[in-house]
Image: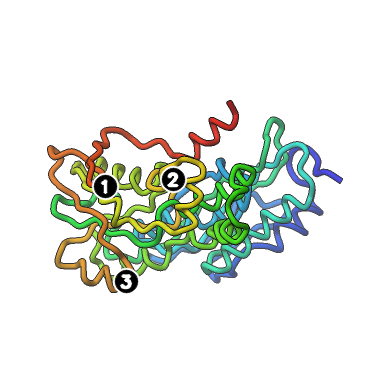
């Protein structure tokens, strides 16, 4: 039995949405229930950090990704993710099990972060080929001041936590299984489990509380290279990034080699970039960060130093390898 077009009926909402609301938080005064169109939250006396992002490129684990991608955005700005809302759009042929999987993922991801699902909307929408989840996350500021992507200064060290192309590796292992059939099943299984590595909330909050980051950014589309470019452009500086210093796992290398893509340009939720002064590099290193480059005066231009020592100029926003591969598959 398929779900009917339009807004979900009450029974489906009660069974698959309202019972899966993540963590219970005392400040949520009005939680999701039938007939309510809004939540009410009594926030702390602190600034609120908010972020919104849809999950469109992935056909798998969209609920899990929606929670973590938006939680990452709040955390890198110096906030603590607490309240999540989602818009779940399902294709016309969607069956109840599809919604069941998505809301289960949202519930588990939110509960794992101590986040409460406070409101949202779910419907079956004509014209979709796969589910789309648009997420919204909010929470109080925990750093002494907001942390932006635009705070990097010339002379700051570019440090990184996690690996390149983590989210992209998981998506490619799912979506391009046929082209990856020459890789071992163990490699593909481990790669698919990379969805569990995409949270950067803990290291971001640790940096926020320590007060040593002049800028933070969780690179998504465009990968680690795109993330460095975005930070430099926002901060009106330039960067130099060393390919050999960027951590890339074995699974990511094997999958990217098989598909002919660059892991540094692959969608990178699961990595965290930060700018820290040279005197604070040691503290960042003890938190699990690695030095991968440096921010410089803008006039020097953006440079990627490849493993063989060659230099590439980065003069524009980086196209993500995932979208390139998906576009080639459609053609």
Q: Nearer the viewer, residue 310 or 167?
A: 310
Mark 2 Cα-neighbour bin, 10 Å: few <14, some 14–19, many ≥20: many
Q: Is label 2 in a helix, a strand or a loop? A: loop
**Relative image position of residue 51 (x, y in whole percent):** 44, 50
Label located before the other in sequence (3 or 2)? 2
Residue situated in front as seen by the camera: 267 or 76 = 267
Task: Tell me where residue 64 sits by quadrant.
Answer: bottom right
Point out residue 68 in the picture as x, y percentages from the top left corner. Answer: 51, 57
Q: Nearer the viewer, residue 176 or 155?
A: 176
Q: Which mark is nearer the camera, 3 or 2?
A: 2
Residue that badge 2 annotates: 266
Q: Residue at x 34, y 35 (%)?
A: 317
Where is mark 1, residue-wise?
308
Residue 87 seen in render: no
Badge 3: residue crowd in 10 Å (few <14, some 14–19, many ≥20): few
Q: Is residue 207 left or right of residue 44?
A: left
In the rendered image, residue 92, in percent from the top left (x then y), is placed at 76, 36
Judged by depth in the image, the label closer to the viewer, 2 or 1, is: 1
Q: Nearer the viewer, mark 3 or mark 1?
A: 1
Q: Which residue is the extreme one toward the front?
A: 182
Which comes before the other along the chain, label 2 or label 1? 2
Whether residue 90 is visible:
yes
Q: Which residue is mark 3?
A: 287
């Amino acid at each position: 039995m398929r779900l009917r077009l339009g807004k979900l009926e009450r029974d489906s909402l009660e069974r698959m949405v309202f019972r899966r609301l993540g963590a219970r938080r005392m400040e949520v005064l009005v939680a999701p229930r039938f007939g309510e169109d809004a939540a009410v939250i009594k926030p702390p006396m602190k600034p609120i950090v908010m972020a919104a992002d849809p999950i469109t490129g992935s056909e798998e684990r969209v609920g899990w990704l929606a929670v973590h991608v938006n939680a990452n955005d709040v955390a890198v700005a110096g906030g603590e993710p607490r309240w999540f809302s989602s818009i779940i759009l399902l294709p016309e042929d969607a069956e109840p099990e599809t919604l069941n999987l998505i809301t289960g993922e949202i519930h588990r991801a939110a509960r794992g972060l101590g986040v409460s699902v406070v409101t949202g909307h779910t419907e079956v929408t004509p014209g979709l080929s796969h589910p789309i989840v648009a997420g919204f996350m909010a929470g109080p500021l925990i750093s002494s001041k907001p942390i932006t992507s635009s705070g990097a200064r010339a002379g700051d060290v570019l440090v990184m936590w996690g690996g390149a192309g983590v989210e992209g590796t998981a998506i490619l292992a799912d979506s391009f299984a046929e082209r990856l059939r020459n890789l071992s099943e163990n490699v593909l299984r481990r790669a698919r489990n990379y969805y569990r590595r995409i949270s950067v909330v803990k290291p971001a909050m640790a940096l926020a509380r320590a007060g040593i980051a002049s800028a933070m950014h969780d690179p998504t589309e465009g990968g680690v290279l795109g993330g460095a470019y975005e930070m430099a452009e926002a901060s009106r500086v330039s960067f130099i990034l060393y390919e050999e210093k960027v951590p890339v796992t074995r699974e990511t290398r094997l999958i990217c080699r098989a598909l002919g893509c660059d892991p540094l340009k692959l969608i990178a939720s699961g990595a965290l970039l930060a700018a820290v002064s040279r005197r604070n590099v040691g503290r960042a290193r003890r938190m699990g960060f690695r030095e991968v480059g440096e921010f410089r005066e803008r006039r020097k231009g953006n440079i990627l130093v490849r493993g063989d020592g060659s230099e590439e100029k980065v003069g524009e926003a980086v196209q993500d390898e995932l979208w390139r591969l998906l576009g080639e598959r459609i053609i």
